[in-house]
Amino acid sequence: MTLDTPIPVVSIVGKSDSGKTTFLEKLIRELSERGWRVATAKHHVHEFDIDVPGKDSWRHAHAGAIATMVVSPAQFALMHDVEREYSLDELAEKAAEAGADILLTEGFKRVARVRVEVSRAERSSELISTAEDLVALVTDVPQDIRGVPVFALGDAQGVADLVERQFLGGPNARPERRGAQREGSDTGSHAEHLPIESGANDGN
């Protein structure tokens, strides 16, 4: 776990146009393919509208609805105004309520506590984080930072290995492994084995 959040929170940070989104997409896919349930949060400094102008729910909101919900048999979305920005702890709680094992965030550079920085030479060789803040660095710039693992820009597998080992309990803690262990331990016993479920512009 990371600090006192209900599930681990790992923030992908870096300067704009450093490749954060591209790397995060790869990391999400890598962890998801291992069976982990991943939630994400993207930080914006300005107001945003994820709805599509002209669509029914957009029309509801612009007519004055304080909250709009879109519901289908497989999905649910809720949009509403807030009085203040949610903290990372609050976002972790929401991700956990949604059944996530881990929350990966993009941005939040001012408040991120567990940070993986992405740095690309084409953008800048200077980092925005100190060595003490980093759990890993993803870069195409030669770096030798004591105590900080360094990965190539495309090495989502290596970072996933680190995240899994350091924050998720290792490969044996993967959800499908937990399920197999529960089934294997239920021999001749009628005790109920409950699933173990952890249970949620740029650059600020």
Image: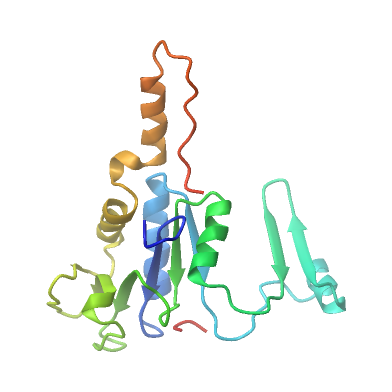
- Residue sitting at 22 percent across and 78 percent down? 131
Residue 54 in percent (x, y) is at 80, 74
- Residue sitting at 28 percent across and 46 percent down? 170
Position of 105 with respect to 150 (left or right) is right
Visible in this render: residue 83? yes
Q: Residue furthest right?
A: 63
Q: Which residue is more in the foreground, 53 or 41? A: 41
Q: Residue 188: name its quadrant.
A: top left
Q: Which residue is more in the foreground, 125 or 88? A: 88
Q: How is the image coloured?
A: rainbow
Residue 194 in percent (x, y) is at 49, 31
Position of 153 with respect to 188 (left or right) is left
Q: Residue 139: name its quadrant.
A: bottom left
Q: Is residue 175 above or below residue 183?
A: below
Position of 156 with respect to 145 (left or right) is right
How many numbered callouts?
Answer: 0
- Residue sitting at 31 percent across and 57 percent down? 163
> Which quadrant would the N terminus be assigned to in this image?
bottom left
- Residue sitting at 42 percent across and 83 percent down? 110
Q: Which residue is more in the foreground, 86 or 98? A: 86
Q: Is residue 201 above or below residue 178?
A: below
